[in-house]
Amino acid sequence: GAGVSQSPSNKVTEKGKDVELRCDPISGHTALYWYRQSLGQGLEFLIYFQGNSAPDKSGLPSDRFSAERTGGSVSTLTIQRTQQEDSAVYLCASSLRAGGYNEQFFGPGTRLTVL
Amino acid sequence: GENVEQHPSTLSVQEGDSAVIKCTYSDSASNYFPWYKQELGKGPQLIIDIRSNVGEKKDQRIAVTLNKTAKHFSLHITETQPEDSAVYFCAARGVDNFNKFYFGSGTKLNVKP
């Protein structure tokens, strides 16, 4: 079956512009996660959804970052007024359910470059 | 929150040799530790995990050990093959939020044929 997909695969934007990153989770997966991976670094947790609800938004780096999920499926991560330090690979993952020991399946990521 | 440290950052071995990657964590209440393999241009993929109620887990050429007292866990790959070349990440699940994972900084493994 289809895995987690993300779009676009690459995004180059100018400082100050807004960007939207999209994640399509595996069908039937109720939990969805966003991570940021800076060059040569590990993954930094941003936010997770159980259904359409995001119980913990404390991982978002600033109020320029927001995320939503609709219909228990597609999620978008929005970064407003992008800064150069936002440049990174943004990874999305989904799992059958939140919590427990449910495996997270990752998408290929969106590489964001802010000039 | 949890702090996970991973080393080495790079590891080069000859095909057929063993590779060991080590991680430490800070919160003694952490109870779940997955390991991921990330190939170039792809997202991480779970390769093995261990829960805090066991000390070792094996899956073919891969094994993970956990020392709760010392708060460290290790990935062992035996009989390495060129296709094992990738970046490996360890992670620890958060205690206050079971959906939040803390990752190490990664180990780039190069298996030379």
Image (cartoon, coloured by chain):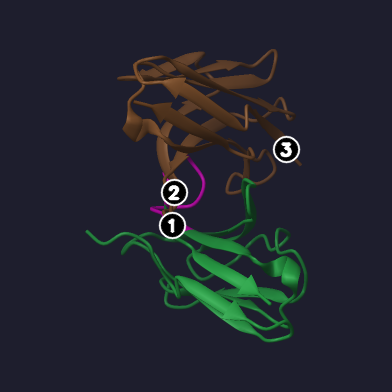
Chain colours: A green, B brown
Is residue B26 visible to the viewer in this orientation of the structure? yes
Of residues A63 and B42, the one nearer the viewer is B42
- The residue indicated by pointer 3 is B2
What mark, if any, has residue A104 been given in the picture?
Answer: 2
Q: Is residue A90 left or right of residue B78?
A: right
* Magenta span of residues: A93-105
Front residue of A101 and B63: B63
Badge 1 element: strand
A60 relative to B12, above or below? below
- Asked if badge 1 and badge 2 are on a common chain, one would say yes
Q: Secondary structure at mark 3?
A: loop
As for residue B72 lying within the magenta part, the answer is no
Q: Which residue is mark 1?
A: A94
Could you tell me the amino acid type at mark 2?
Answer: Gln
Q: Is residue A82 left or right of residue A1?
A: right
Q: Position of residue B4 (x, y in %)?
A: 69, 34
Image quadrant assignment for residue B46: top left
The disc label shown at residue A27, or none: none
Q: Report the amino acid beneath label 3.
A: Glu
Residues marked 2 and 3, same chain:
no
**Where residue A113 sits in the image (x, y, percent)?**
62, 72
Give above or below for A95 relative to B5: below
Give SS at disc 2.
loop
